Image (cartoon, helix red, strand yellow):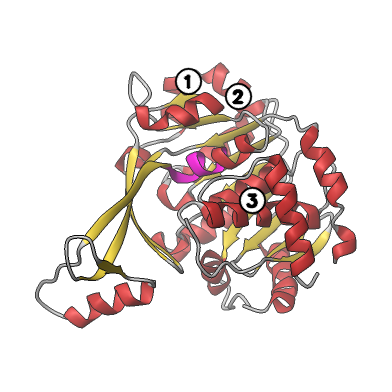
């Protein structure tokens, strides 16, 4: 597989990167917390290391009440648009981003994002309380501000012709998260039907698939499959989201990379999209209508510095690498490297760090 990843070609691609990326439609302020297992004095405490510890403490309570002390780790912006745009802009692009970043004026929490993106705000941001552990995170989002976004809201705030120009001029239009957007299907139908000039590709992150019922997921997949001939579509899932998607068809997503390669191809054909991607802590895989299947292994990080936004960072790396010229293996390698840099350091890779990480990944994984 290493023969399919040309690091020099990837480096040259990012030296001359250009293209029009548009991302929507959310905007979160993330409150990141750590849950404590115990505290011995004012300065000494022990944090819970795993999600299982957190869950077992809650289950052990059974009935009645309980308290788990929490401490603040950081506060920042997040969501699909925040995390994905951070990764995209770090690699040399300035995306146009539509979401909820403040009403009237941009909330100061999004100042960094405003400096690196063309920001269009629809209203006040949503808020997500996130509990981070060594093996993942538990998120409690309050999404009322996003639930009410529909096609009419977009045209009212942005203007119909301006919206058509923004969406129609995109090389890649990324939309997330389906799970928090009741009007997702309506928005996709309208942009496919009403835009004379259409985006060259649509990219989707569904997020917590289990949040909505199976029938809503089936309806959306049917819609996207029918519209894929108008605009090529990419669906990106993490391993848990893949489990939920496969369960809809009476299947399970394999943990083994080789088995996953075959299953991805079968599922992509079944739902009728141009590309289906699954990214896990151990590998990323794709089934592409034009390129077939590809698997690129990932070095597992035992002690991540930051996990909130890791999946979106993969998406950002993949989107940035999808503007033409890189093959499926190379695009997955970029997504993996972007994620690896992020979880190890807590910040997004620039182009130099990204290439260094790809070299390291290629040396240490069995490709």
Residue for badge 3: 338
Q: Which mark is residue 294?
A: none
Whole-Å distance between the Cαs marked 3 and 1?
Answer: 32 Å
Q: Is residue 247 above or below residue 18?
A: below
Residue 200: image quadrant is top right
- Crowding near the residue tagged with mark 1, few <14, some 14–19, many ≥20 C-alpha atoms within 10 Å: some
Whole-Å distance between the Cαs marked 1 and 2?
Answer: 10 Å
Q: What is the residue that sits farthest to the left in this orientation?
A: 64
Q: Which mark is residue 158?
A: 1
Indicate the secondary structure of the residue bearing disc 2. Answer: helix
Residue 86 visible in rendering: yes
Residue 31 visible in rendering: no
- Crowding near the residue tagged with mark 2, few <14, some 14–19, many ≥20 C-alpha atoms within 10 Å: many
Q: Is residue 312 above or below residue 94?
A: below
Question: Which span is picked out in magenta?
Answer: 78-85
Q: Of circles 2 and 3, which is in front? A: 3
First of labels 1, 2 by sequence position? 1
Q: Which mark is residue 166?
A: 2
């Amino acid at each position: 597989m290493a023969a399919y990843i040309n690091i020099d070609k990837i480096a040259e691609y990012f030296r001359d990167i250009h293209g029009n990326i548009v991302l929507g439609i959310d905007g979160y302020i993330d409150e990141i917390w750590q849950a404590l297992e115990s505290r011995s004095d004012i300065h000494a405490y022990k944090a819970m290391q795993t999600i299982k510890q957190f869950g077992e403490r809650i289950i052990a309570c059974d009935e009645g009440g309980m308290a788990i002390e929490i401490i603040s780790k950081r506060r920042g912006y997040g969501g699909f648009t925040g995390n994905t745009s951070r990764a995209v802009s770090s690699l040399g692009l300035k995306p146009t981003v539509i979401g909820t970043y403040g009403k009237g004026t941009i909330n100061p929490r999004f100042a960094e994002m405003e400096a690196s993106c063309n920001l269009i705000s629809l209203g006040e941001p949503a808020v997500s309380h996130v509990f981070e552990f060594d093996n993942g995170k538990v998120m409690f989002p309050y999404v009322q501000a996003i639930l009410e976004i529909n096609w009419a809201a977009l045209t009212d705030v942005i203007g119909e012709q301006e919206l058509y120009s923004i969406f129609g001029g995109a090389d890649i239009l990324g939309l997330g998260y389906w799970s928090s957007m009741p009007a997702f299907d309506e928005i996709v139908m309208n942009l496919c039907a009403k835009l004379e000039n259409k985006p060259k590709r649509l990219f989707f992150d569904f997020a917590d698939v289990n949040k909505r019922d199976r029938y809503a997921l089936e309806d959306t997949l049917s819609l996207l499959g029918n519209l894929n001939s108008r605009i090529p579509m990419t669906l990106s899932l993490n391993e848990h989201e893949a489990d939920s998607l496969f369960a809809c068809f009476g299947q399970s997503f394999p943990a083994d990379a080789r088995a996953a390669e075959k299953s991805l191809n079968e599922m992509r054909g079944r739902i009728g999209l141009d590309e289906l991607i699954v990214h896990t802590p151990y590998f990323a895989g794709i089934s592409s209508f034009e390129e077939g299947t590809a698997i690129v292994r990932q070095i597992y990080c035992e002690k991540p510095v930051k996990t909130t936004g890791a999946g979106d960072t993969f998406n950002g790396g993949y989107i940035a690498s999808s503007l033409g010229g890189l093959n499926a293996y190379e695009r997955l390698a970029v997504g993996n490297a972007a994620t690896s840099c992020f979880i190890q350091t807590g910040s997004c890779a620039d182009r130099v760090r990204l290439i260094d990480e790809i070299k390291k990944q290629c040396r240490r994984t069995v490709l």
